[in-house]
Image (cartoon, rainbow, N blue to C red):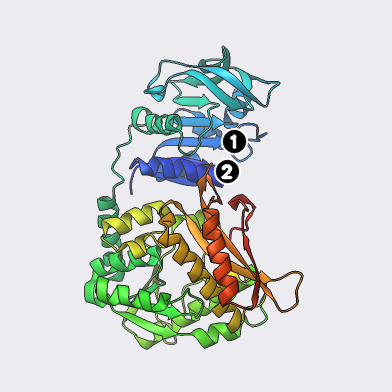
Amino acid sequence: MQNAILVLDHDPGLAGLIARTLRNMQVYCVPVPFDITLAQAQALEARGLIVAAANGVELSLAGFDPALLNGTLPLLALGAMVPALCAHLGGAVLPREAESESVTLGLAEDPLFAGITGGERVLAALRDLTPPAGYACLATATERCVGFYSPQNRLYAVQYPIERNDPDSVSLLSNFALNVCGMEPDWTEDRIITQTVESIRAAAGEGRVLCAVSGGVDSAVCARLAQMAVDQRLMCVFVDTGLFRRDEPEAVLNTYMETLGIVVAHVDAQDGFHRALRGVRRALEKERVATSLLRLVLERQLDFDPEIHTLVLGTNYNDTLYGRVQAEDPPRTDDARPITVLEPIRGLFKEEVRRLARALSLPSSIAERQPFPASGLALRIFGEVTDEKLETLRKADAFFSEEIRSGGHERKLWQYYASMAENPDEFGGWAVVLRACQACSGEACASRLPYDLLERVGARILRELPRVRRVLYDLTPSQHYAQVE
């Protein structure tokens, strides 16, 4: 087991941001439940704890283990956790009149603030504090206390927000991990690869290994790691659901067989998936149907080869942290043999998986592939899925992707695709909705694509796809989307 900074998960989005920020600096960090006990934290070989909430949130410390405050482990509290802890420890907390204000930030001389300067800041929802007995003021905002600390108790609390792409946020987290907790920046790609290959080899023993691949970066990294672990005892399977983008199944098989030198069994399950999706309209039900069918196909593959005792899946940390993947029962085989399910990258964020892909020399077509749901294009059709709708959407998506790539816009985009719905004011007609988004303020927001590009895509779709009567551009920010992708 490896030493870690633990982030108590009061807010999944914020906990994930803190963990990703530290891991980008090669410091191992893990989100854990908010109600973790001191004994559990020590069992995880924690070197320090971070607990954070957005400023302005009214918090209860119900479930928080007070033993975490006894100085056994360094603890950094951020945002709204600071006034909550101040009151809990016997200090005083007063509200400020302004929701957001320009303040002069003053910082104590402490290794926590190495490389960070005070000065003018605009901070939201600050609370004025009187530190508890035995604690000193750690930070001020225009000479009013907004943080407190005790080096003896190893508790640091400051109402400073952690934001994406903020250099001072990065420095604050880095200083806590390295200067206060004594962590080493050793969470490197080489270390991850070595540890993961060894774990796959140990779990597989002398048996054969089956790896499910989809064409995405997650399963490709797992396949490469499994190949390094067991070599010729690896078998990969690609399930063609009939829900992929244009020419995608052929491209996936060619990449694995010709570029990576990995043998892949191709299972054509298009008819079964199309039948199962008839009449299904809701997005979550489409995901459930697709996931269930994929599981059945994998169980059949296990039955074909009785020497397989290990199944490798490409679940990543983003899937589990945000609740998109739930634990399932082990797969069943006709001969009832035990199957070990391995998820080698379950503890890695998507960005880490992409870095691992590059370290493993996987082609950019895999390393930079956009996120794609298990139910594929079915999820991007609002309403019932039909063969005609799938083919129409497949072409519209290809037109949009071609224009994006021809202008070099894909380099700044996190995701871009087309979806389709019934035209609301015309029976029998369809509307195609184009979406391109990029990272902004911790979320994904609509990209400002050139208008002439959108005009060209719209004109081509209307000209070549006669059932489509409208083309729209989606401006919805990601926080308003259901988290299905």
| Label 2 CA crowd tier, 10 Å (few <14, some 14–19, many 20+) | some
Among numbered discs 2 and 1, the one appearing first in the sequence: 2
Q: Which residue is mark 2?
A: 11
Residue depicted at 38% across the width and 29% down the height: 175
Question: Which image quarter holds the C terminus?
Answer: bottom right
Residue 58 location, quadrant? top right
Q: Nearer the viewer, residue 436 or 5?
A: 436
C-beta proximity under 8 Å, tags 2 and 1: yes
| Percent x, y of residue 270 | 50, 84
Give, as a three-letter code, the residue at label 2: Asp
Give, as a three-letter code, the residue at label 1: Ala
| Percent x, y of residue 451 | 55, 54
Provide the secondary structure element on which disc 2 rests. Answer: loop
Q: Is 307 situated left or right of 292 in this image?
A: left
Residue depicted at 52% across the width and 71% down the height: 376
Q: Which mark is residue 132?
A: none
| Percent x, y of residue 476 | 63, 53
Residue 271 shows in this picture: yes
Q: Which mark is residue 54?
A: 1
Residue 72 shows in this picture: no
How far apart in space, not on screen, are marks 2 and 1 (Cα)? 8 Å
Q: Nearer the viewer, mark 2 or mark 1?
A: 1
| Percent x, y of residue 225 | 29, 64
